[in-house]
Image (cartoon, rainbow, N blue to C red):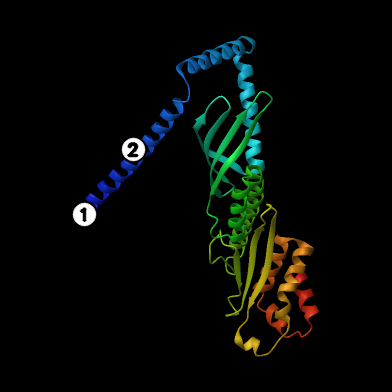
Amino acid sequence: MENNVYKVYEDEIQLLEEEIKLLAEKYDDLKQESTFYSDEEILTSIKLFQKEFQGESKGECPSDLKAQLESLEREMSFLMKFTGIHFTSHSKKTLEKNENRTVQKHRLSGNCHSLPFQLEFQLLETQNKENVSAVITDFNIRMESEEYSDLSKFVSSTEKHRNLLLFFRSLSSYAEWYEHRRCTFLHFKAKYPDIVALPEGQLGDYMILRNPKLPGFELMIVWKIHIDEEGRTTPVLDLLTKVPEQVLERKMAPFENAPTCFRSMLLLFGIETAIENLIKVAGLEKSIPALLTRGNSSKYCSTLVYKG
């Protein structure tokens, strides 16, 4: 009993120490940030802000400002729904500042649909008499991409080329397909609980179809999401079969053509309809033996496509 009490106290002390450490780091960042600006520059900025605020307040009533704010909120909400990108935090730290150049370190955290991400990049701004330019000089992306080899390769390529726009545009497309796959798997699992199994859960990339009255027979629908180094996203679906030994001993041909037939269904009907047709075939006790006894692979393909 005493050990449990001590463990609770130790955990609480550790959390407090971590919080103190984070606050100390934040204080140091703010302190370093302030050293780049003189007292005169700070006072000038405050006066300029007050002057602009007072000038705008004279020309616009509170109701107009409220309407503008509501309009901006609607636009922001639309962009978040359209892209699926939602930022949860942002911090900025000035590393260098003089008359000609400014180097700032930015940290961004957020979610794109159900995929969390963290970004760290340095922004170099240079200024001369003619123009002002900004370049990303360092770019690091942190997200759970180890489980997805294609996404991991894309992240590495984006970091190498320091292309912030390409990252957000491609991540939005990838995450949209990722969310669509998750919702599709959950839909069919809820609709056909006795036939559909998700061994890796809703975030996995495959689903298993089983017929309770035909033990040993399985259909595996594999749904990968491919993203190349240029950010092009493509869903890739295929069908794998697991057939009992007694069926294999008959040397029935139709199962060899099942993946080809499934790909034909995808082209003809789309992902959801193709999967549902396959689930209905797998759930019919008499349909699979009937398919096994047909030697003509074209008849098997026709039955698989149009059955149900």
Q: From this view, report whether residue 154 is shown above or below residue 193.
A: above
Q: Quadrant of the N terminus?
A: bottom left
Q: Amino acid at mark 2?
A: Ile
Residue 104 image offset from top left, x and y in percent: 53, 34
Provide the residue designation for mark 1.
Answer: 3
Q: Secondary structure at mark 1?
A: helix
Q: Amino acid at mark 1?
A: Asn
**Residue lying at 60% horizontally and 56% vertically, measured from the top left:** 151
Provide the residue designation for mark 2.
Answer: 20
Residue 48 image offset from top left, x and y in percent: 55, 14
Residue 111 falls in image quadrant:
top right
Residue 1 visible within the image: no
Residue 31 image offset from top left, x and y in percent: 41, 28
**Residue lying at 62% horizontally and 34% vertically, measured from the top left:** 134
Structural distance between the alpha carbons of marks 2 and 1: 26 Å
Mark 1 packing: few (<14 Cα in 10 Å), some, or many (20+)?
few
Nearer to me, 260 or 290? 260
Mark 2 packing: few (<14 Cα in 10 Å), some, or many (20+)?
few
Q: Which mark is residue 33?
A: none
